[in-house]
Image: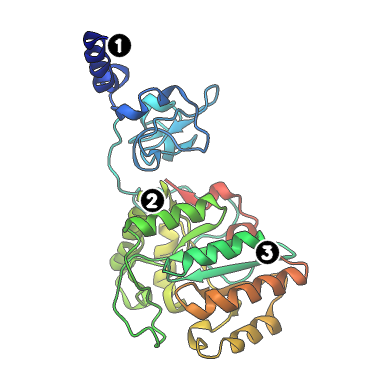
Amino acid sequence: MISPISSIGLLWLCTHFGALVGSTAIPPNNIFSRQSTTPDGTCGVQNSGNGNGYRCPAGSIQCCSQWGWCGGSSEYCGPGCQSNYGSCTGGGGGGGGGGGGGDPPPSGGRSRPGSVPYGAEISSCTAGGVVALTFDDGPHIYTSELLDLLGRYGAKATFFVKLVKRFVDKDKPSGQNWGAPITDGSKQDLLRRMVGEGHQIASHTWSHPSLSSLSTADMSSQMTSLESAIASAIGRYPTYMRPPYFDCNSACLGVMDSLAYHVMYSNLDTLDWANQGNIQASMNIFTQSVASNSLVLAHDVHDATVHTLAEHMIVESQNRGLRLVTVGECLGDPADNWYRT
């Protein structure tokens, strides 16, 4: 039995342990977790670190970024790097345990890894024997069921998400999502689930405008505002985007190039938004058009898409021996290139 004096001493230790071990305090219920190496790539106590205090692997240059993820590039090791949970020597920026600013880096200075073009329209897959299903405008109330369905079939997909909630007539083709914005806790959980289950998240802008109608400054703001919202959920933000209405003129492509985005279009539009009352029409479009380089457009904000069309697309593809993969995989782009911090 612990004496009253010992109990007081233990309480003091739990309350002050964070100050003793480093500049970033660890929640009392996790005071010993900083001794543990990360089991999932998350680290530290901020954002995706979720207060767990995991360390990045020892024996390699693994920095704990301000967003709570381990990595070795300057985006992980630079400003905001949490030095209590890994190295901060890989990118010229030191940060104590505390985290620095939360904004993504400015345009012009972003890394451009891989061979997939930046700032250019991409409409089809380059890998053979694959199909990339993509879903725009969510996440929405049906997205969780879609993730369940994809999981049952071992299929992967890419979700082009946006933030702003707008009231619209759900029976009219608007391209808008409904319900809470992605800064809502339930939507953030869905984003984390997408990544955790091997799907890809990409940008569909902040509020779904026709980008070509905006100034270049507003085009940039549409992208960077959403970046911060996505990063707050998954600790990273996408390198892939899709312009709403497929509307991205030369000025828009220039902005996407400066922000180092891959600009995704599609070579198989199911027109599901127009066929919710006759989803068989979209099923027929898919059946007649799907091929080994198909980059498919659908929307997870629609009931019939999630509950009828999606399974048809999965089964039809797999029956033809085609693998359902993310956009990044269908372009031969390693998963490390799909996001930046």
Q: Nearer the viewer, mark 3 or mark 1?
A: 1
Eye-nearest disc, 2 or 3: 2
Q: Nearer the viewer, residue 110 or 141?
A: 141
Give the residue type at disc 3. Answer: Thr
Mark 1, residue position = 2
| Residue 305 appears anywhere in the view | yes
113 horizontally vs 175: left or right: right
180 to 69, vertically: above or below = below
Which of the pair 26/89 is nearer the observer?
Answer: 26
- Protein image colouring: rainbow
Query: Which residue appears at 37% of the width and 26% of the height?
Result: 83
Sequence-wise first label, 2 or 3: 3
Q: CA distance from mark 2 to mark 3?
A: 30 Å
The residue wearing badge 3 is: 126
- Confirm whether residue 96 shows in the render: no
74 vs 336: above or below: above
Tell me, yes or no, whether the two marked residues, 2 and 3, touch with CB atoms within 8 Å. Answer: no
Question: Is tag 2's residue or tag 1's residue first in the polypeptide sequence?
Answer: 1
Q: CA distance from mark 3 to mark 1?
A: 66 Å
Q: For the residue carrying disc 3, how many other residues have a C-alpha within 10 Å: few (<14), some (14-19), or many (20+)?
A: some
- Mark found first going from the N terminus, 3 or 1: 1
Residue 71 in picture, x, y percent from top left: 49, 36
